[in-house]
Image (cartoon, helix red, strand yellow):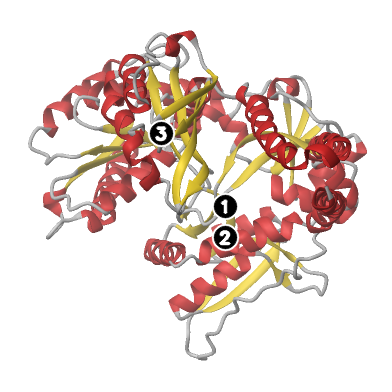
């Protein structure tokens, strides 16, 4: 009785203190001030200067701190890259449009914070060094992107979003993220699209009464390199990959995108974590109420039935807990491994009909699994549910868990949880199954959406990057790659309309897929750029090229009469001692051939490339 009271008092104390400390942590009370620690250490006066431009209105990536010093994730990233290159970093902060002008006029070598999917003329992009989300900000939250219809939506000048999404709204251009959010607050526009981490910092800094709601898409900020410096882009890619392998990239993300942006005002915390506080309060009250009931019960029975009551109470508590959580699971059984017996907490008819209660627990388990699990997963599930090895597999573990496919219920999750021990060995376990079919299907759907381009239904840049990384780690000898670029797409977009431009992109994707799907995979890696990867030599390539050439020649759209695509093909035989580590060299060969083909097209047609 006395011990229970002490536990209850401790629970009450922890229950009061925990949300206070949680809130203080969310506000950032315990976090250290975030500042630039990776500095440019190159002091050699003869060292080359790496000229870099960045948006001053892009916290936590690039911004001025309270002392007027340049600050942010990208600043530390470029300082470390400059150190690795042995160059002096010269970083200039200005607005985004000026950044682009400086790069295109060759006053700068690099531009920071460039979206991996953007299409800026004269710029090469490195691999992304961080991940963010493009979110929709407004005075009120929206629940669906469709609510933007007929609204005024602000975004950065020349944003690629206008070419990727048709939101049936009026897009309005701005030169800074702050001006977008200020326009929302003034009522000039209805909503704005910004990086979630950037917009959140601006709102907090300027005490704006705005909120973020629906996420439009994932964002992958990279470094833009002038296209006359491909060797610099390749060197920076190697450095970024090295920093990633050494864990430095993840540390910078944790520092700036988690710790720095995590510091919120009290109102922000209360609003963002309102569900947590409500659930916590309910949980706290319920558990407190249960404690009170237990204490009252013990108080009335303590004198006459102390020993028996403690045993009965322990047993009752266990059964109450198991019964209360049984509804979460499809089935729940308590299995005594030493006695080889089973106690049913909850079950289903589809399981129960295969149980013969005169048999031992292991035989019953095997019978159920053989009759309810798909054939493809049968060996795995029989190994997982082998009760003769469960105790050994649970040693020093809180649980073991696995997923399988059921004949009637689809995907389900099975787990063993130890509940009692004897001489250091697990004696009794709880075995549960939980249906997760809908969750698995949803995860598969989301995975597919993240890997395929919405417009063309081809695999997207993310799938391509993953494929290149995978191939680079393999001992591959034969490989063929091809790069494709649609001619005159900009002219069609500017002089016909973007629907016609989309028709060209879809037409190109259709011709590529129908021509090469037998031997390789086609990826859409940019607005009008596609890459073909064939894991074979080029011996059979010509007949597929002929098929592709005919498909393009025969294509005719509703808005555009013809389709012209420049292409460059390269086989692994063109690279000396080819292996997985030389894929970039192979891609560079194909890329040069494609640009040569594009130059020939514009020369032969007498058209300017950018009319």
Asked if marks 1 and 2 touch (Cβ < 8 Å), the reply is: yes
Q: Establish if 519 lies above or below 66.
A: above
Determine whether the residue tagged by mark 2 lies in a helix, strand or loop: strand
Residue drawn at point x = 20 percent, y = 25 percent: 518
Residue drawn at point x = 42 percent, y = 40 percent: 461
Q: Is residue 226 left or right of residue 537?
A: right
Dot 1 crowding, Cα within 10 Å, few <14, some 14–19, many 20+: many
**Residue named by callout 1:** 114
Q: Quadrant of residue 401?
A: top left
Residue 458 marker: none
Q: Nearer the viewer, residue 117 or 562?
A: 117
Residue drawn at point x = 9 percent, y = 32 percent: 540
**Residue named by callout 3:** 339
Q: Is residue 581 left or right of residue 98?
A: left
Q: Nearer the viewer, mark 3 or mark 1?
A: 3
Q: Nearer the viewer, residue 310 or 93?
A: 310
């Amino acid at each position: 009785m006395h011990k229970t009271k002490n536990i209850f008092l401790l629970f009450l104390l922890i229950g009061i203190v925990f949300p206070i400390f949680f809130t203080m942590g969310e506000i950032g009370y315990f976090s250290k001030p975030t500042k630039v620690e990776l500095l440019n250490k190159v002091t050699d006066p003869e060292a080359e200067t790496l000229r870099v431009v960045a948006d001053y209105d892009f916290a936590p990536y690039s911004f001025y701190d309270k002392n007027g010093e340049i600050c942010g994730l990208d600043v530390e990233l470029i300082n470390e890259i400059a150190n690795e290159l042995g160059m002096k970093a010269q970083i200039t902060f200005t607005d985004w449009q000026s950044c682009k002008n400086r790069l295109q006029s060759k006053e700068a070598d690099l531009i920071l914070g460039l979206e991996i999917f953007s299409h800026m003329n004269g710029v090469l992009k490195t691999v992304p060094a961080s991940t963010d989300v493009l979110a929709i900000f407004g005075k009120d939250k929206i629940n669906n992107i469709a609510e933007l219809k007929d609204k005024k939506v602000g975004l950065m000048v020349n944003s690629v979003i206008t070419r990727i999404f048709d939101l049936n709204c009026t897009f309005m251009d701005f030169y800074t993220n702050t001006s977008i959010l200020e326009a929302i607050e003034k009522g000039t526009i209805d909503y704005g699209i910004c990086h979630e981490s950037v917009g959140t910092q601006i709102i907090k800094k300027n005490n704006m009464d705005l909120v973020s709601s629906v996420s439009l898409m994932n964002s992958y900020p990279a470094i833009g390199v002038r296209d006359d410096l491909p060797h610099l882009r390749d060197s920076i890619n190697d450095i970024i990959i090295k920093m990633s392998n050494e864990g430095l990239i993840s540390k910078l993300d944790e520092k700036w995108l988690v710790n720095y942006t995590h510091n919120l005002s009290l109102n922000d915390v209360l609003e963002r974590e309102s569900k947590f506080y409500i659930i916590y309060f309910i949980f706290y009250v319920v558990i407190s109420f249960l404690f009170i009931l237990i204490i009252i019960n013990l108080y009335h029975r303590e004198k006459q039935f102390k020993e028996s009551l403690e045993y009965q109470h322990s047993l009752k508590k266990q059964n109450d807990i198991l019964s209360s959580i049984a509804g979460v699971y499809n089935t729940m059984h308590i299995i005594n491994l030493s006695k080889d017996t089973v106690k049913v907490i909850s079950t289903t008819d589809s399981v129960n009909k295969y149980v013969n209660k005169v048999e031992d627990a292991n035989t019953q388990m095997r019978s159920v699994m053989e009759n309810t699990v798909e054939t493809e997963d049968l060996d795995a599930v029989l190994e997982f549910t082998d009760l003769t090895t469960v105790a050994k597999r649970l040693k020093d573990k809180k649980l073991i868990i696995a997923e399988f496919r059921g004949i009637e219920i689809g995907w389900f999750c099975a787990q063993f949880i130890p509940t009692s021990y004897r001489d250091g060995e697990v004696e009794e376990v709880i075995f549960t199954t939980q249906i997760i079919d809908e969750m698995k299907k949803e995860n598969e759907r989301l995975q597919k959406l993240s890997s395929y381009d919405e417009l063309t239904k081809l695999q997207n840049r993310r799938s391509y990057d993953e494929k290149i990384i995978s191939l680079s780690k393999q001992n591959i000898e034969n490989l063929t790659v091809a790069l494709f670029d649609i001619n005159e797409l900009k002219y069609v977009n500017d002089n016909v309309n973007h629907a016609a431009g989309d028709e060209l992109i879809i037409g190109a994707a259709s011709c590529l897929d129908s021509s090469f799907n037998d031997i390789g995979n086609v990826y859409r890696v940019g607005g009008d750029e596609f890459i073909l990867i064939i894991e074979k030599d080029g011996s059979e390539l010509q007949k597929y090229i002929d098929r592709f050439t005919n498909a393009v020649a025969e294509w005719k759209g509703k808005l555009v009469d013809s389709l012209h695509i420049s292409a460059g093909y390269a086989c692994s035989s063109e690279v000396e001692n080819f292996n997985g580590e030389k894929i970039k060299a192979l891609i560079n060969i194909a890329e040069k051939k494609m640009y040569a083909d594009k130059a020939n097209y514009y020369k032969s047609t007498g058209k300017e490339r950018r009319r």
